[in-house]
Amino acid sequence: MPGLGELLRYVGELVDQGAEEEYRAMNLPYRARYTPVMRALAAGAETVTEITALSNLTQGAISQTVRLMEADGLVARHRLEDGRKNGVHLTARGRELLKRLEPHWAITFTAIDALEKEIGHPLLEVLAKTARALEHQGFAARLRAAAHHANEDHVDAD
């Protein structure tokens, strides 16, 4: 049986592949990985740090995605008033694309609801709870605890 990391990556790949296929069918010049950035910008985020906080992705992943979106003409950078950071904003092309994507995202959540009914589990809720639990105690700490427990069981068996 595949491990947790393998299954999570595989499910992510399947979701992204399906999304990419639909974006092509809609004739949209868009990558699924842009969605967290687009949604965060639409919600008012203005910096990579703010986008990261809203998306639950790493700052490195967000920075890389912003660079790709910049190359595709969807976002541009601007100096913030405090002069310490660059802001990110949607270009006219990005705003137009956002208008086309928002109804699609509503349909996406309908599809997720149907998937959850099919599998009999609230997938988004389970993943959110899993993320919170791992934020509270990281997986490395959980591995160490499991190894410690296994060693104690081995000593007790002697």
Image (spheres, rainbow, N blue to C red):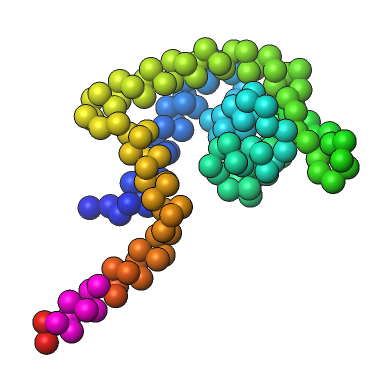
Overall secondary structure of the magenta section: helix
Residue 95 location, quadrant:
top right
* Residue drawn where x is 50% and y is 27% of the image: 20
Residue 150 location, quadrant:
bottom left
Q: In screen coordinates, is 44 left or right of 124? A: right
- Which one is nearer the viewer's eye here, 72 or 53? 53
* Residue drawn where x is 53% and y is 30% of the image: 32
Q: In screen coordinates, is 83 left or right of 34? A: right
* Residue 125 shows in the view: yes
In magenta stretch: residue 154: yes
Magenta segment, which residues?
Answer: 149-156
Residue 81 location, quadrant:
top right
The number of numbered discs placed on residues in the rendered structure image is 0
Image location (x, y in percent) of residue 127 = 37, 40
Q: In screen coordinates, is 122 left or right of 153? A: right
- Which one is nearer the viewer's eye here, 53 or 19? 53
* Residue 65 shows in the view: no
* Residue drawn where x is 62% and y is 13% of the image: 99
Image location (x, y in percent) of residue 49 = 68, 43
